[in-house]
Amino acid sequence: MNPNTTAILILLVSFAIMILLRFPIAYAVGISSVLCILYMGKPLTIVVQMMVKGVNAFSLMAVPFFILMGVLMGSGGISEKLIAFADSLVGWMRGGLGMVNCVDSFFFGGISGSAAADTASLGTILIPIMVKQGYDDDFATALTITSSVQGILVPPSHNMVIYATTAGGISVGSLFLAGYLPGALLCICLMVGTYIISVKRNYPRGSKFSLINVFKQLIKSFWALAAILIVVVGVVAGVFTATESAAIAVIYSLFVSMFVYKGLDLKGVWKAFGDAMDTLSIVLILIATSNVFGYCLTLLNVPKMAAGAITSITTNPIILALLINLILLFLGCIMDMAPIILIATPILLPLAKSIGIDPIQFGIIMMLNCGIGLLTPPVGAVLFIGSAVSKVQMERLVKATIPFYICMLLALLLITFVPAITLWIPHIFMDYPL
């Protein structure tokens, strides 16, 4: 057997075996890379060099700040303000609280940047309220976890920064702007699904629409929503780099959480720093070990071989785009989000570019695919969080989520085949080519 083929088998088979044995993903990536490098006769110093190189990127400095910002704002008493604001906008519809759930996730996602944080924070508040008002608990939980995926699409998202760094030469500002319309599209698709189910099950309406109430709730939630403006407008206007805007947003979030909404005290701040450190340690070790894995893939020409294997099936751009989505959806079922971005981007991005998918558009496609993966067993982290928060059995929750899977897949297809959904806002504000 060709030595390169053997090395590829050692890398991929050992990785797959460790995933099946439920190794922590960072260990699975790192150990399989070491085994491959040993077989190829390369010095093990390469492992250390590649790990250091993986995290030694200035753009990655934004990641810990965005994570900390999300934790501070998520635990600083802003959830109730955003729920009240969303209720004033859409609570009057049939299934009003379900609509509030969707819209609130759009707002909160732009602050937390995390589907898990969205589910854990908003779910503990909204799910009991929805159940109390007559909504089925499995429906309320399924809607909460699916709408939380907007947190990945709506900036600032630290996963977008990781993708921009991995893809190379991608503007973080353009990527941030590109997430808004897809996030809104996902929100609308989920709201349509919610309305259909609400009519069928005769779920209640909320209070009547009042423009005065909307204005009143907007003022109360202004301080929370302003955090998004600091990050996105600052980066897009060129006032800050992504890293600088993230650092400023952390200081702002700390001030708002402690002195405006008064949801955090010094003890809470210390806990928030600890939670952020836990998340950051996982992200950074994944980036480091995935860089070694990526080195092995590149050395063995796996991206080129994978692209050749896929294009040998068909050269039809539509079918190739669907295949890329299927691969990402499958990976989402067995891996967490960060390793998918780090490992799959070097392999699939060149193929996507070859069929006319823009790197910014591909980034959003990857974000949504990974978001859907967070809701699918056996590794769906947000699915498990939703089940734990609501005490709904996993089997019932997966069944209740099926209609929302359909809504999300519809949004994914539109984003894949209508580039303007992703690229229009970057084109308007940053003159990004359509």
Image (tube, rainbow, N blue to C red):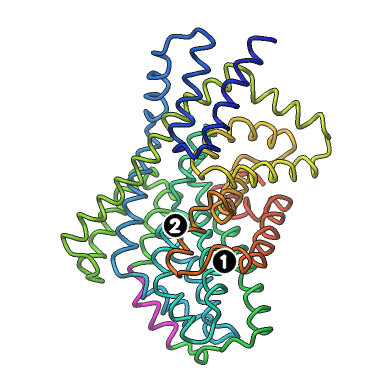
Secondary structure, mark 1, is helix
Q: Amino acid at mark 1?
A: Leu
Up the image or down, 106 lies above or below 85; here it is: above
What's the magenta region? 213-223
Extreme-bottom residue of the structure: 208
Secondary structure, mark 2, is helix
Q: Amino acid at mark 2?
A: Ala
Q: Position of residue 38 (x, y in %)?
A: 49, 12
Q: Which is more toward the observer, 40 or 218?
A: 40
Magenta stretch: helix, strand or loop mostly:
helix
Extreme-left residue of the structure: 266
Dot label at residue 397:
1
Measured Cα–Cα span from mark 2 to mark 1: 16 Å
Residue that numbered label 2 is attached to: 116
Q: Residue at x 55, y 77 (%)?
A: 99
Whether the magenta-drawn stretch holds residue 67 is answered as no
